[in-house]
Each structure stands twice: as C-alpha cells, then as structure tokens.
Amino acid sequence: MFKRLAAEALGISDIGVIVGPADYSKVDADDYLFSEDGEQIFFLIKSKKDEYCFTNLALIHVDGDSAVSSKRSIKRYDYSSHQFSGVSIETAGTLDMDIELKFDLDGLKFSIDVKKTHIEQLKDIYKALITIGKQQRRDQACRDNALRALEATASVHKLNIAPDAGGLVTQYSALLAALNTAMFDTHTKRDFSDVFTRYIHN
C-alpha cells in the first residue's frame, strides 16, 4: 500500500485515465485504426506505459516497455476471433487511488488500473464487455449447431440416401455456401457499434 502511495506521489505509477472523444486523435492507438473499414474508437484508457483502445471492431493494446521508453508494441484483438470472459471491476479501498478493470481474452488476462474518479465511466465499459461476451458465446453455440447439422447431412450421404453424383455436387456447393455464410457472417458478429453506443456515455 505504501509503495503504491509513494509511486503515485512520485509520478511513477501506471494508473490509467479515461481519455475523452475530443482527444482520441492525440493518442497512439488512433494511428492503427482501420478507419477505411469504418473502425472508430468508443472507449480508451491511457496510462504512462499503455493504451487500451476499445473500437467497434477490436481491442487495440499499445503496450509500452516502461514509462520512460518510447518503444511500443501494437497488439490487436479482433472481437470476431477473440472472446471476452471473466469481466469484473475491483473497486478501490479507502486509501487506494485506483480501481481495476479485469477480463480474459481467449485465456489472456488483462488487469487495468484506472483512477478511481473514473468509476462511473468504467461501469460503462464493464457493461459493454459483458454484453459483447454474451453475444460471442451465443455466436459460438450457433456455429457449433451449424457443424452438427453438417455432420447429420453427411450421415445421410453415408446411408446412400443422397441423390446421384450430379445432384450431390450441386447440393455440396449449396451446403458449403450456406455453411460459410452461417459460420463467418450470420453467426460471427464483427462490429459492436450498437453495443458501445448503448452503454458508453463518455
């Protein structure tokens, strides 16, 4: 506790702040947006070392080695292929100066310290991430069902109930197209603008 207080007093701690929309153009993460594809920032936490940028399409983590180094590593986690789980907020104690936003992203654990004055804004991203995680799990269940349906169809062919060779090729092409649409379009949500718009009020 005393080390944390001393670090904050000396200005060497890595407690983040919420950056407002008016300053999005000033952060490093802004340079790595796929703006050509309609990507935009909805929530951003910035500390001395790191930036955690939540866009409608991905989490962009600008990972700094240290507060005094200019070296940065840019890591991108698209929501279409990385699932949120274990989202939580650890609130501050009486003497603490920070709160923590925690979540897992496909087993990769994140723990982000944020100044406790930003608690209301942090509640917004908490709700958004939980909602995204729910949709991702639903999509995964639908994709699993699509694969089970494919297996059932394959069993029909094994039982020689299938049509002749020409008809089989036609059915295969149609089935493959339908499966790809189900797996990559219908049941893989990529853009979560609606979720962020609903919950983020900064």
Image (cartoon, grey):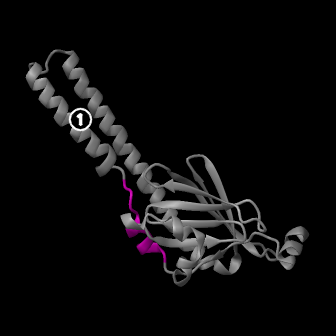
Q: Quadrant of the N terminus?
A: bottom right
Image location of residue 80, percent across then percent down: 43, 52
From the viewer's perspective, tell me whether residue 89 is left or right of residue 199: right
Image location of residue 73, percent across then percent down: 64, 57
Placement of 154 over or under 130, stated as above or below: above
Considering every residue shown, the one lying at the far bottom of the view is 22
Is residue 126 something one can see in this rendering?
Answer: no
Q: Which residue lies at the image location 74% right of the left edge and 73% below the top edge?
A: 98
Can you identify the residue that label 1 sits on? 176
Placement of 57 over or under 10, stated as above or below: above
Residue numbers of the magenta segment: 189-200
Image location of residue 130, percent across then percent down: 50, 61
Image location of residue 45, percent across then percent down: 61, 71
Decide which of 131, 50 is in the foreground and name it: 50
Decide which of 115, 26 is in the foreground and name it: 26
The quarter of the displayed image where residue 183 is located = top left
From the viewer's perspective, tell me whether residue 103 is left or right of residue 77: right
The quarter of the displayed image where residue 2 is located = bottom right
Q: Which residue lies at the image location 13% right of the left edge and 21% below the top edge?
A: 162
Dot 1 falls on a residue whose secondary structure is: helix
* Total number of numbered discs in the rendering: 1
Q: Is residue 108 magenta?
A: no
From the viewer's perspective, tell me whether residue 67 is left or right of residue 76: right
From the viewer's perspective, tell me whether residue 144 is left or right of residue 16: left
Placement of 149 over or under 20, stated as above or below: above
Q: Which residue lies at the image location 48% right of the left edge and 71% below the top edge?
A: 41
Decide which of 155, 28 is in the foreground and name it: 28
Considering every residue shown, the one lying at the far front of the view is 70
Q: Of the residues shown, which amino acid type is indicated by label 1?
A: Leu
Is residue 88 something one can see in this rendering?
Answer: yes
Number of other residues with Cα within 10 Å of mark 1, as a class: few under 14, some 14 to 19, many 20 or more: few
